[in-house]
Amino acid sequence: MSIRYLSEYKLFKIDTVNTTYILSITDTEGFIGHVYYGKLISDDDVNYLLRTSYNKWLPSQLPSERNNFMDMFPFEFAGSNTGDFRESSIEIEDINGNRSVNFTYDRYEIIKEGFNRNHEDLMPSLYNKSETLVIFASDKVLGLNLKLYYSIFDKEDAIVRRSELINNSSTSIYLTKLLSMNLDIDNDDYDMITLHGNWGRERKIERYKINPGKHLVSSIRGRSSHQENPFTAIVQKNADQTKGDAYGFNLVYSGNFMSQVEVTQFGDLRFCMGINPKNFKFLLETNETFSSPEAVLVYSPNGIGGMSRVFHNLYRNHLIAPNFAYSKRPLLINNWEATYFDFDDEKIISIAKKAKEIGLDMLVLDDGWFGTRSDPNTSLGDWFVNESKLKGGLTSLVAKINEIDLDFGLWFEPEMVSPVSMLNSMHPDWAIKISDREPCLARNQMVLDLSNPEVREYIFDSIATILRSCNIKYIKWDMNRQLTDLSSSFLPKERMGELSHRYVLGVYEIQGKLLKEFPYLFIENCSSGGARFDPAMLYFSPQIWTSDDTEAIERLSIQEGTAICYPLSSISCHIAASPNHVVRRETPMNTRARVASFGVLGCELDITQLSSDDINLLKAELEDYNSISDLILKGDYYRISSFNENNTHDSWMIVSKDKREAVFTFVQVVARHNNREFRIRLNGLDPNCLYRIESELFSESMTLHGNVLMNAGIIIPYAGKDYVAYQFKIKAV
Ligand code: DGJ
């Protein structure tokens, strides 16, 4: 594990435990080229991979064909308008209206890093990097400087890249695009995997062959979005959960992004990732710097499963706050699907009492406790308690909840303002809108202009005042609409193109400030369900609300997709009512609980209305969850089968790091017409270890070796009906 400059070969070699990434500089021109990314290789001269020596076609040798060279060379960070017609990583507009930009190498630095988690940095970033390579480059004509950062970690096979542009010229420029990275690699008949969806159907895994041309996933919605996630994988055609090359990329950013795979005219592949250049135009004055968000790169030769486990370890060890990453999460009940807006203090207290009885730890009061809000049409921005609903106010309610021996959590939607609100009547200019244009409302609300420091201060003060006034351990930070009508009454017109990015920085600033004053505070981010499930949100919140679709069967593919790169301990899953409020499907309590036990479990139903049978079942399932919650927080995830692919069943395992304990969950979604049992091969166990397997399916426990469980598999009897879930606890004997 090291970053070195191999001077004899003029190569920068970035080795993680099992992978190597190489870049190199061409002699005369100083072009920075990509050489290799894959399995760990020896310190040999692999510059031949640049293909520059074969036919003497470098511009210094063949100036008449400079354009051909520029359009073919594997640039480590592609400029624009200088002969490379593939996707660029940077675009600018200079004082004369010209748009050419290209960088050549100046020098490098290798920095030893340590723990560095600073809430005052506006851009969330992975902490405790071991080493960072900084490549300094410049556009000598424009006087612009570029820094390319490559960081590695002690134990994880991941690289984090980002870029920084410094305007060292004497005039201002417009920066119209600055991606975090591009990667030029040879094509290997790869497939592409993306996470696609919409409200209530987030992050469904899509896999497709990469054909010539550009394949773009992106968001211009002001949030990372339900529709596409800032994650892309490029995998070998034969790659599955256990084998094959898998490259995964994830952007640490919560706003507009682009992630694109391009197959060039020569069949090579260029991958790009970063802030979406659409709706982005940044004025960079002399001496000003613009920094991109970080992009995480993972290569695994062990298939998609291998790649997922690297992401999970990386995010638990280097992204989620260390005081929460591996610590027990509160088992909470949220009143949203129990009451929606229709509650008062008595109702909330009755839910809390029942919650204590069945073993929950916390009550979270959702939307509707403030202003005059009793439907989605008013009061966002008016963050003071509605005492006609909650008599005695929040302090009294929190005290009563604490007396029941439950912790208390509270919902906010801080970034919004309702047209009908005191805030909007006092500060109509604080909403993002264009003055003479009808604002495009969504859920009857508008978005606050977080580029304006006064607005950010108002939001911070509103939340902090409440947090200072009573014992609130947790907040659910919601964000329920997309950004439209991009215009700010605060920004000057030459900076209007900065709004979308400054908005995202504003979110980070407020959450960072809150965590600084209230370091114990547990934030769960949420955005109309899971429209902001991204690594940047994980920096502030150890878990994220996954989807407003709380129905167990629908959740299977949402949770499977989410876990492709996000750890199970970040995936917030609630047991909801049956029939489910979103899709009306009826499923048994056990199935709902076991599907919610995929990640961080909570409840979101009116437990005061449950039958005593259901209460007993729920109680038992919660106890069961407590017995495996440590595995979920700390273990390794193995996807065993996918309902998304086979249309009958879904299953997964979580195995402790020492492989002495595991849990296997199997959901038979659709009853099969031939009554045949399922034979399922497990994964991740120690082949030579003898395990005891317990399940409600067996009258006595079984003991089998890991190699039998993984090669021969286990038989799961046919349930004879839909929506049945079984859980198997596996322990080394
Ligand atoms: C959207 C969230 O995803 C829900 O969980 C709930 O908090 C509602 N907003 C409340 O308005």
Image (cartoon, rainbow, N blue to C red):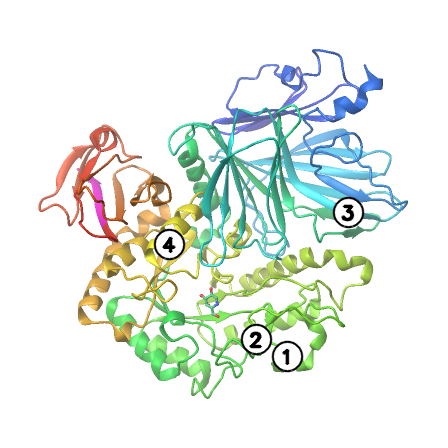
Disc number lying in front (4 or 2): 4
What is the total number of numbered labels drawn onto the structure image?
A: 4
Quarter assignment of residue 10: top right
In the image, what residue type sits under mark 1?
Answer: Leu
Is there a contact, CB below 8 Å, between mark 1 and mark 2?
Answer: yes
Q: Nearer the viewer, residue 82 or 518?
A: 82
Using a 10 Å C-alpha cutoff, classify the residue at mark 1 as few (fewer than 14 neighbours), some (14 to 19) or many (20 or more): some
Residue shown at the point (37%, 44%) measured from the top left: 644
Using a 10 Å C-alpha cutoff, classify the residue at mark 3 as few (fewer than 14 neighbours), some (14 to 19) or many (20 or more): many
Assign a secondary structure to mark 2: loop
Is there a contact, CB below 8 Å, between mark 4 and mark 2?
Answer: no
Side of 718 relative to 194 (left or right): left
- Give x and y (percent) for residue 119: 59, 56
Assign a secondary structure to mark 1: helix
Q: Which residue is mark 4?
A: 555
Side of 204 relative to 143 (left or right): left
In the image, what residue type sits under mark 4?
Answer: Arg
Mark 1 or mark 2, which has the lower sequence index? 2
Q: CA distance from mark 4 to mark 2?
A: 29 Å
Q: Which residue is mark 2?
A: 380
Q: Which residue is mark 3?
A: 175
Q: Which residue is mark 1?
A: 423
